[in-house]
Amino acid sequence: MLGLRAVHKTYGSEHALRGVDLDLSPGITVLLGRNGAGKSTLCHILTGMEPADSGDVVRHGSPLLTRSDWRQHHRATGWLPQQLPVPAAMTVEEYLRHAAWLKALPRKDASDRIDAALVRVDLADLRGRRLGHLSGGMLRRAGIAQALVHDPDVVVLDEPTVGLDPEQRAWFHSALRDLSRDKCVLVSTHLLEDVEAFPGRVVVLDQGRVVFSDTTEALIDRGEVGGTSQERLRSGFLHVLAESEIAP
């Protein structure tokens, strides 16, 4: 459905992405990596927030080349950045109405889509609350709602659970599992707890390269035998990173 082909990106002399190939399909794909691995850069390029130096973003097998291609891509993609801009004086509903306008959602459809997005993240009762008065967890819910207001088929979330307490993180995991039933969802994270919550496909990024792409179970199997599933997951992750450092 959506992917990258041989994508390179540098910032000065620093290589952020090195020939990355990635394919996303319906369901949840977890993009796992240490801080500085290139995860945010990958998300920015995938969503069109910044260009690659070389390579292509592809949708349904075709590269996005023209302005029209990219406009359609933006309208079919939801995006929750790691640092969500918070216009504190806006109410939740005003925030979503602004997001709908940015996505060129017809005015006649906006109210119904806003209602649906608020219900999906359980914020319907707080639609009149100002963003500056919301807790961190509620702000993350508002962030998901703005990413969903135009009913995209792809949703990209960059470090969505950072700063959330265990109860908020559990709600988030449940909400994303529900969301992935009818959408393609990419979750970028450095938290192994997020990987455990979404047993499915894991892509490990290290030093701007994809060094692992398989199931959660396959990553666990790369670790030491014995211990809890999270201990084995951590061991498998560290094993993959160690292999990538000595690979030619």
Image (cartoon, rainbow, N blue to C red):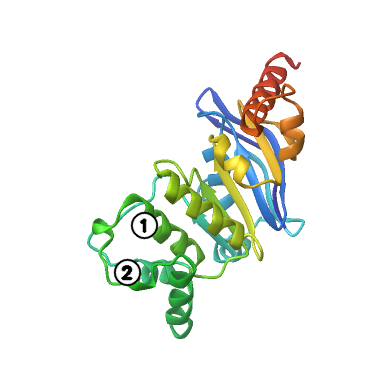
Secondary structure type for disc 1: helix
Residue furthest to the front: 227
Q: Position of residue 44 (x, y in %)?
A: 53, 46
**Circle 1 residue:** 138
Residue type, label 1: Met
Q: Is residue 78 left or right of residue 204?
A: left
Q: In the rendered view, tell whether residue 78 sits above or below residue 190.
A: below
Residue 165 picture quarter: top left
The x and y percentages for residue 43 are 56, 45
Badge number at residue 232: none
As drawn, is 44 to the left or to the right of 91?
Answer: right
Label 2 element class: helix
Q: Residue at x 34, y 50 (%)?
A: 136
Specify whether 75 is left or right of 220.
left
Q: Left of 121 or right of it: where is 71?
A: right
Rendered location of residue 112, percent (x, y): 46, 81
Other-residue count near label 2 (Cα within 10 Å), few / some / many at <14 / 14–19 / ≥20: some
Circle 2 is placed at which residue position? 126
Tell which of 148 and 28 is nearer to you: 28
Type of the residue with mark 2: Leu
Residue 176: quarter of image: bottom right
Screen quadrant of the N terminus: bottom right
Q: Residue at x 57, y 35 (%)?
A: 192
Residue 203 visible? The answer is yes
Q: Are marks 2 and 1 in contact (CB under 8 Å)?
A: yes
Q: Is residue 235 above or below residue 105?
A: above
Classify 46 as above or below 216.
below
Sequence-earlier tag: 2 or 1:
2
Q: Residue 214, how many percent across, how many down? A: 76, 39
Front-most of residues 92 and 51 = 92
Q: CA distance from mark 2 to mark 1?
A: 9 Å
